[in-house]
Image (cartoon, rainbow, N blue to C red):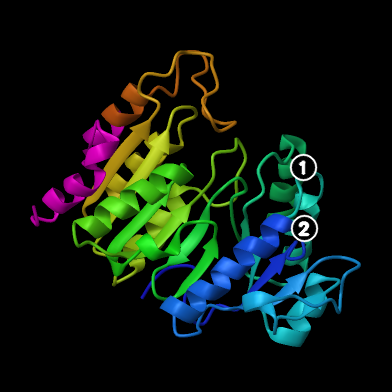
Amino acid sequence: MSILIGKETRVLVQGITGKEGNYHAQQCMRYSQEFAGGGGAVVAGVTPGKGGGKLDGALEKVPVFDTVAQAVAATGANASLIFVPPPFAADAIVESVDAGVPFVVCITEGIPVRDMVYVKRHMQGSPAVLIGPNCPGVITPGGCKMGIMPGHIHKEGSIGVISKSGTLTYEVVAQLTAQGLGQTTCVGIGGDPIIGTMYIDLLRRFQEDPATEAIIMIGEIGGSAEQDAARWAKKNVTKPMVGFIAGQTAPKGRRMGHAGAIISGGEGTAAEKMRVMAECGIRVTQSPAEMGLTMARALGRA
């Protein structure tokens, strides 16, 4: 099993005729063909004003529509992957939600905070799940790839991965695979101040997933999401957990990489987050080079 996506997922790509959208849609389709037996495929593209257009390469049989509602009605798409420029990305998310798409991944970086406030309010009461924005996406190895991650480094297995950092997601996956530890699902939640799904919801899903044996959670400086998740996990997660926080040497008041990665008022430091995680029973590693090894040791396999 897995969480969020699998071979049954039917992906539509918003912005599929743009340079980035087309390239990564091609990669997602190739992953479906090479690693998932055709499951988790891209079944539609959406670009307003370009409905009926033709694509090439791995997408040559994928139809293009003007609206998400048209794509869902014609293809049965049940997940949306968004590569729309920042000024229009919030509207793209809302369009998918309003069309009844239950799962939405937004890769776009640089969406104005005010636009995401609107999206969050619009989604209140909606059953739709949003991952991102400003994230690498989600992958279930051997099932479905919805994002920009290098698919070939992933391996089917029993470790759930949650991370704010795209680069560290790839790093921990490579380390886990090198340790012989495959993954159930890997989720990059994004590093913006306002994002869709947070740690706790994903921890709950991994805890309920019988195929997930253990969980690794990667955070970064700024805010208190990691501390809140650690305290929640202490009460609700029975599976082994490993944690890492990026930004251990970051100076106060300087944003590091993601828009939400900033130590403000002396709060949200890496040291504070790691202390709380350790107090809550999570095995915390100080070095990003030992994330996979720490998980292997937690499972008694190293």
Quickly name the residue at label 2. 92
Count of numbered tags: 2
Most foreground residue, 298 or 30: 30
| Cβ atoms at labels 2 and 1 below 8 Å apart | no
User: Distance of mark 2 from mark 1, alpha carbons?
Assistant: 11 Å
Most foreground residue, 276 or 144: 144
Task: Name the residue rendered at 83%, 71% in the picture.
Answer: 67
* Residue 78 at least partly seen: no
Asked if the magenta segment contains residue 129, the reply would be: no
Q: Which residue of the protein is positioned furthest toward the right in this rendering? A: 49
Q: Is residue 23 left or right of residue 150?
A: right
Residue range highlighted in magenta:
276-302
Picture quarter with the N terminus:
bottom left
Task: Name the residue rendered at 77%, 86% in the picture.
Answer: 74
Q: Label 1: few (<14), some or many (≥20) within 10 Å?
A: some
Most foreground residue, 130 or 109: 109
Task: Name the residue rendered at 69%, 60% in the picture.
Answer: 21
SS assignment at label 1: helix
Most foreground residue, 165 or 289: 289
Q: Position of residue 129 (x, y in %)?
A: 59, 61
Q: Is residue 182 left or right of residue 262?
A: left
SS assignment at label 2: helix
Q: Position of residue 29 (x, y in %)?
A: 57, 74
Query: What's under tag 1, amino acid-wise?
Result: Asp
Q: Is residue 203 left or right of residue 158?
A: right
Asked if the magenta segment contains residue 294, the reply would be: yes
Quickly name the residue at label 1. 115
Q: Quadrant of residue 26?
A: bottom right
Task: Name the residue rendered at 44%, 48% in the picture.
Answer: 199
Q: Which mark is residue 299?
A: none
Q: Quadrant of residue 285?
A: top left
- Mark 2 vs mark 1: give the one in front: 2
